[in-house]
Image: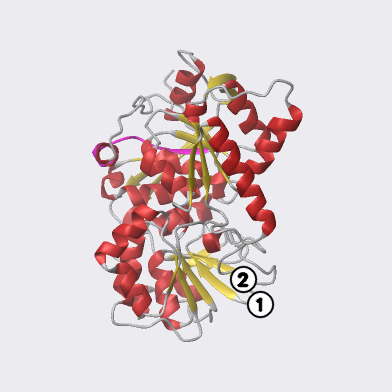
């Protein structure tokens, strides 16, 4: 019987010819990413719980400070210093103030066929390059860091066959929110979500990252896309080659299969307080907002900034709205500067921030107050995610967020 992409990557990492969903295997991890959200806890465990602390291979580790940049308190500063000092002592690749962890990983590290653990739930974004990326907690991260190995329960796979092309004014963000709304926040619990079909040809790398990144909001263990010419060009531009190329066998077994016509997708909004609480964006039209956020590992790339800047050209941010624009990495920031996008945002009254998690993380920049309304391209809209627990967070595409910032109320681009 054939294997899925997820099964093939795990089989390779486990040194097995074949694995099946439901089996547990010991695997060698190709790379380990951690950020300032929890790395200080891992360091404490390393020093306090291990009899003979060691790192199996420092070349596999990438540590990134991105959640609170610059630090928002003495406590945060202390935890980041702990991370900074440990990385320097052990020769770990370390980034600070250069962007969101997943964007940096995609720009500089991820290779097709790799098995990557990240101490952050949105590590599944790496599937856009055909890598098995999955989020883990501190103890699993520490074990893999010390031994170079871990264990994995082989997940079942849900396949999404994409056909057609997204309509003008509709984006990959609308597609993945539609899918999450369709299958539910638990619809892919501990499963791999695999995307395939002719519709993939119309999706850019930015689109693909956005789709894979949010799959964890449906409970997915990972997300995967077969590597094609678009992905190979992205790799080549960055001087990388695949570890190994995988695709699902024709006779592979899938837990479920869906066919989605991209032309049927419409602008979507996820209403408070769950990502699967979705509706047609027009159903939320007219709801007054206090703040808008364009950024995050999901929608802070150059293509998203272009969409926002194009809508703002010749217009102004509503006087009662705070519009925070946050590029996902310094590479993106510099490209946006060269294209004049940053100038457009600033001239329109937006607040442009340094590359970091910002409002999506909701603990430093752009925190919203009691009963305030935020519309965001961030990853989550749970209670308290972006500040006060009585605030309301709506999730939408870069176009809908920008249009809302201009109107002062939730709106789609065609309402301007």
Q: Residue at x 42, y 55 (%)?
A: 328
Tag of residue 216:
none
Question: Residue at label 2?
Answer: 392
Q: Nearer the viewer, residue 135 or 362?
A: 362
Residue 73 is situated, as x and y percent measured from the top left of the image, at 66, 60
Q: Residue at x 48, y 13 (%)?
A: 16
Residue 383 vertical position relative to residue 61 in the rendered view, above or below: below
Left-right relation of 80 to 322: right
Q: Residue at x 38, y 68 (%)?
A: 399
Q: Is residue 226 magenta?
A: yes
Query: Colour scheme in the image?
Result: secondary structure
Determine contact: label 1, label 2, CB under 8 Å: yes
Left-right relation of 386 to 330: right
Q: Residues within 10 Å of mark 1 (few under 14, many from 20)?
A: few
Quadrant into which the N terminus falls: top left
Task: Kindly report the distance in space between the C-alpha atoms of the residues bearing marks 1 and 2.
Answer: 7 Å
Residue 20 vertical position relative to residue 309 in the rendered view, above or below: above
Residue interval drawn in magenta: 222-233
Residue 135 visible in image: no
Residue 302 is situated, as x and y percent measured from the top left of the image, at 33, 58
Q: Nearer the viewer, residue 105 or 330?
A: 330
Q: Residues within 10 Å of mark 2 (few under 14, many from 20)?
A: many
SS at circle 1: loop
Residue 184 is situated, as x and y percent measured from the top left of the image, at 57, 51
Question: Residue at label 1?
Answer: 371
């Amino acid at each position: 019987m054939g294997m899925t992409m997820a099964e093939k990557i795990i089989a390779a990492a486990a040194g097995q010819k074949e694995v099946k969903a439901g089996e547990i295997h010991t695997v060698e991890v190709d790379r380990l990413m951690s950020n300032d959200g929890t790395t200080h806890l891992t360091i404490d465990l390393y020093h306090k719980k291990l009899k003979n602390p060691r790192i199996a291979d420092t070349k596999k580790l990438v540590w990134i400070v991105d959640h609170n940049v610059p630090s928002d308190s003495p406590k945060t500063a202390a935890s980041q210093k702990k991370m900074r000092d440990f990385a320097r002592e052990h020769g770990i690749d370390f980034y600070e103030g250069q962007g969101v962890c997943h964007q940096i990983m995609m720009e500089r590290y991820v290779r097709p066929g790799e098995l990557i653990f990240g101490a952050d739930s949105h590590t599944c974004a790496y599937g856009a390059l055909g890598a098995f990326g999955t989020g883990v907690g501190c103890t699993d991260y520490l074990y893999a860091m010390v031994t170079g190995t871990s264990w994995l329960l082989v997940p079942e796979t849900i396949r999404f066959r994409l056909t057609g092309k997204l309509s003008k004014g509709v984006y990959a963000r609308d597609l993945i929110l539609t899918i999450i709304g369709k299958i539910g926040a638990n619809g892919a619990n501990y499963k791999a979500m695999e995307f395939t079909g002719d519709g993939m040809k119309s999706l850019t790398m930015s689109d693909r990252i956005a789709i894979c990144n949010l799959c964890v909001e449906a409970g997915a263990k990972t997300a995967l896309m077969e590597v094609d010419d678009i992905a190979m060009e992205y790799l080549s531009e960055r001087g990388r080659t695949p570890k190994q190329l995988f695709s699902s066998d024709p006779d592979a077994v899938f837990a479920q299969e869906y066919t989605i016509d991209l032309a049927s997708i419409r602008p979507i909004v996820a209403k408070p307080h769950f990502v699967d609480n979705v509706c047609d964006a027009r159903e939320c039209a007219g709801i007054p907002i206090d703040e808008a956020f364009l950024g995050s590992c999901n929608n802070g790339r150059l293509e998203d900034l272009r969409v926002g800047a194009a809508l703002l050209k010749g217009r102004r941010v509503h006087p009662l709205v705070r519009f925070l624009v946050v590029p996902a990495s310094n590479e993106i920031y510099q490209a946006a500067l060269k294209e004049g996008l940053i100038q457009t945002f600033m001239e329109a009254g937006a607040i442009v921030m340094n590359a970091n998690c910002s409002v999506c993380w909701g603990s430093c920049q752009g925190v919203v107050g009691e009963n305030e309304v935020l519309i965001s391209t961030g990853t989550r809209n749970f209670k308290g995610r972006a500040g006060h627990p009585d605030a309301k967070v709506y999730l939408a595409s870069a176009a809908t967020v920008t249009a809302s910032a201009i109107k002062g109320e939730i709106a789609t681009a065609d309402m301007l």
